[in-house]
Image (cartoon, helix red, strand yellow):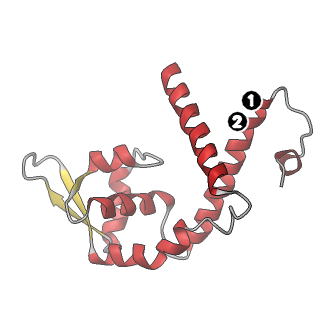
């Protein structure tokens, strides 16, 4: 569906404004799709993101700060997120050996098993993106990367 039809707006001030709105609209649409998928497993986006970060560190532990720095949607309430994952048996928390005020996190076997179980469903966007070639996806990724670099430079 074209953006114009989705938001029922035919004219835009310029293509740049349309692009920003299109990115926001599409991002929200993809976010909702993922929310529906995750709901079946009792996870939020942020919890899923934390589990994936810890899986990438496995078998090593990761500090809370490292996890926070890698999150797609950083949360000021990372402690609560980790508490919920720990209650579900998906994450273990350890005192950092060098700094007792810091905590390290590890994904548990249950967490790894859950990611393995839901991984294909959560990370497979091919059906939704079937009309986009790999070359087009590469181009879109390049444009979005450049956009973020430019925005970061401007502060």
Residue furthest left as drawn: 98
Q: From the top left corner, tell me how far across and down residue 16 is, in percent.
A: 74, 29
Residue with the mark numbered 1:
16
In this rendering, the answer to whether 22 lies above or below 97 is: above
Say which residue appears at 34% left-offset and 73% top-offset: 111
Say which residue appears at 35% left-offset and 66% top-offset: 85
Q: Is residue 6 left or right of residue 21?
A: right
Say which residue appears at 49% left-offset and 22% top-offset: 153
Say which residue appears at 36% left-offset and 51% top-offset: 78
Q: Nearer the viewer, residue 11 or 102?
A: 11
Task: Using the image, tell me which numbered label, if any, was put on residue 20.
Answer: 2
Q: CA distance from mark 2 to mark 1?
A: 6 Å
Residue furthest right as drawn: 10
In this rendering, the answer to whether 4 lies above or below 36 is: above
The image quarter containing residue 12 is top right
Q: Secondary structure at mark 2?
A: helix
Residue 155 shows in this picture = no
Q: Is residue 46 left or right of residue 132?
A: left
Binning the other alpha carbons within 10 Å of mark 1 as few (below 14), some (14 to 19) or many (20 upward) gives few
Q: Secondary structure at mark 1?
A: helix
Residue 1 shows in this picture = yes
Q: Nearer the viewer, residue 72 or 40?
A: 72
Q: Are circles 2 and 1 on residues that touch, CB within 8 Å?
A: yes
Q: From the top left corner, tell me how far across and down residue 101 is, in percent.
A: 14, 46
Q: From the top left corner, tell me how far across and down residue 141 is, in percent.
A: 58, 45
Binning the other alpha carbons within 10 Å of mark 2 as few (below 14), some (14 to 19) or many (20 upward) gives few
In this rendering, the answer to whether 53 lies above or below 19 is: below
In this rendering, the answer to whether 3 lies above or below 153 is: below
Q: From the top left corner, tell me how far across and down residue 2 is, in percent.
A: 84, 50
Q: Is residue 48 left or right of residue 112?
A: right
């Amino acid at each position: 569906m074209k953006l114009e039809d989705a938001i029922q707006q035919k004219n835009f001030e310029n293509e740049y404004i349309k692009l920003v709105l299109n990115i926001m609209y599409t991002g929200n649409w993809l976010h909702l799709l993922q929310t529906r998928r995750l709901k079946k497993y009792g996870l939020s986006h942020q919890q899923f993101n934390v589990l994936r970060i810890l899986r990438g560190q496995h078998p090593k532990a990761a500090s809370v700060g490292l996890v926070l720095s890698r999150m797609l949607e950083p949360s000021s309430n990372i402690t609560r997120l980790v508490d919920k994952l720990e209650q579900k048996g998906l994450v273990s928390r350890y005192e950092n050996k060098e700094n007792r005020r810091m905590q390290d996190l590890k994904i548990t076997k249950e967490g790894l098993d859950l990611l393995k179980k839901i991984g294909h469903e959560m990370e497979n966007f091919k059906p939704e993106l079937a009309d986009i070639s790999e070359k087009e996806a590469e181009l879109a990724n390049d444009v979005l990367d450049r956009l973020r670099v430019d925005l970061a430079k401007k502060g």
